[in-house]
Amino acid sequence: MITQILIRDIVLIEKLDINFERGLSVLTGETGAGKSILLDSLSLALGARGDASLVRSGVSQGQVTAIFDIALNHPTRQLLQDSGFKYEGNLVLRRIQSADGRSRVFINDQVANVGLMRNVGRLLVEIHGQHADRALVDTGIHRAFLDAFGGFEMEIEELEVLYNNWKDRERELSRHRSAVEEITLKANYLRSSVEELGCLDPQNGEEEILAERRTHMIKSEKIAGNINEASEILSGFHSPVPILANLVRRLERKIPEAKTLVEPIVIAIDQALDALKEAQDGIDLAIRTMNFDPHELETTEERLFSLRAAARKYAVTVENLPQLREKMEKNLSELNAEEIALKQMEGDVKIARTLYDTVASNLSARRTKAARHLEKMVMKELSALKLDQAEFIVKITVNNEQRSAHGIDTVEYWVRTNPGMRIGPMIKVASGGELSRFLLALKVALADGGSAPTLIFDEIDTGVGGAVADSIGQSLKCLSKRVQVLAVTHAPQVAARADAHFLIAKAETGREGRIATRIHLMESHGRQEEIARMLSGAYITDEARAAARKLLRGER
């Protein structure tokens, strides 16, 4: 709860110290007395946007200090501890606003930032007006209030852990998938290269062996060519052997006629034929011994040329092709492992999402049950606030594909103000006065499990009559038994139920006729006069005083 507000040099406030207690405190005063200034000052200490126009004219800076007494288990303590702020005793929020527009923030006299102050302020104080953006008309906080009402803090924490785990895995999967996609082209290149080198199957030292073999076979080819040519000459179509043999036979028939002349010739030709026969035998032996195969030379050359072509393609030596193949196979294996890991990660993401969906679905069912209970409690309060014909609905929309850290539900408070009227969002359907009562009924219903320790109601009784105003005062009084309630009001029925009644008024400072806002806690007689003024206006009648006494005694 807030225990004290200290204001220095803010607009019309020169110096103001206000002490608050538990229960219901009301602030009343003439229009323009400075009630809004007081709320603006408090908002400044709760992290609202600073403004140089808030600084009182003629001074360089203004200052607002708000002091809170906080329960030991209040989440504000954990928030500050997580932010590096440790403290014991009261919590002090101090905001210094300079006339040049700069602003400084202190939490327990430690320098802080406005963001942290704002987060702390939201946990400590709620300010509600007919259309206050911090009130329950903000659909963004409807779910949080329902969860607090249902006591789902542990489920929300578990769901948040599961959601973050799922999202972390999903982000990791996305990064890994992008990486795999980037190397897909490389993987395709590696696969084709490994397949090509696998078919080629290069061996260590193979180029040297093939080159030597090719050189030898080329030489053998030339020798074989010459031998084959000699064989062709000696035994081919144009061989001289048959001619010489035929010549010998003709000459032999002439020997008897000219032995001396012919016989030496026959003998020489016979010797030549024997030599040619010996030469042919040598040629045949050489051919059989060499066993030269032109196809083998062609195969050897193709193999050697294929190896050298692959070496040029992959910019390595033929000698390094086997090592390149091993390296590519290893890289491909690693890429395959990445793809296997990707499938594993996809499975992990699916499991994480399934775990989240299970808890989210269970929480959604519990929210629906809590929503029906909240509707009954609010309807009960609406009856007391003279809205017994109205209808309050907690509208829960479940979208399994719209997951968040808080579940799969969108929660919105809808109302129907009168039978036969259309139903719709509270802010769009309810009038100003009706909206105030809906908000109050909600806060009474949520007080035990969805409320800040201090609630401020800024003229929520505007536009309502006496009976309704009295009902509002009764509800505020009931609410103040569970949380601290501050109410700025123009309704005497509300003011009469307060535990503490503060009067805000303007007064001259005595210095050059300057005006300043003053505030003081009224005693019983002062309260009676103020309530009588609220009843009758500027001229207070005896009847108004009598009516004020009845209100203060609880007589309605």
Image (tube, grey):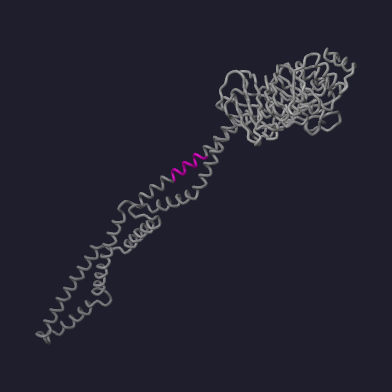
Residue placed most toward the observer, 152 or 345: 152
| Region rendered in magenta | 332-342
Please state, as top left, top right, bottom left or bottom right, where the C terminus lies in the image.
Answer: top right
Measuring from the top left, give residue 128's x and y in whole percent. 74, 27
* Residue 300 in the figure: left or right of residue 135: left
Question: Which residue lies at the image location 78% right of the left edge and 32% below the top edge?
Answer: 427
Q: Magenta stretch: residue 334 in it? A: yes
Q: Check the image and name the residue furthest to the bottom.
A: 257
| Residue 315 occupies quadrant | bottom left
* Residue 219 in the figure: left or right of residue 479: left
| Residue 491 occupies quadrant | top right
* Residue 446 in the figure: left or right of residue 538: left
Measuring from the top left, give residue 155's x and y in whole percent. 63, 25
| Residue 304 appears in the figure | yes
| Residue 219 occupies quadrant | bottom left
Please state, as top left, top right, bottom left or bottom right, where the N terminus lies in the image.
Answer: top right
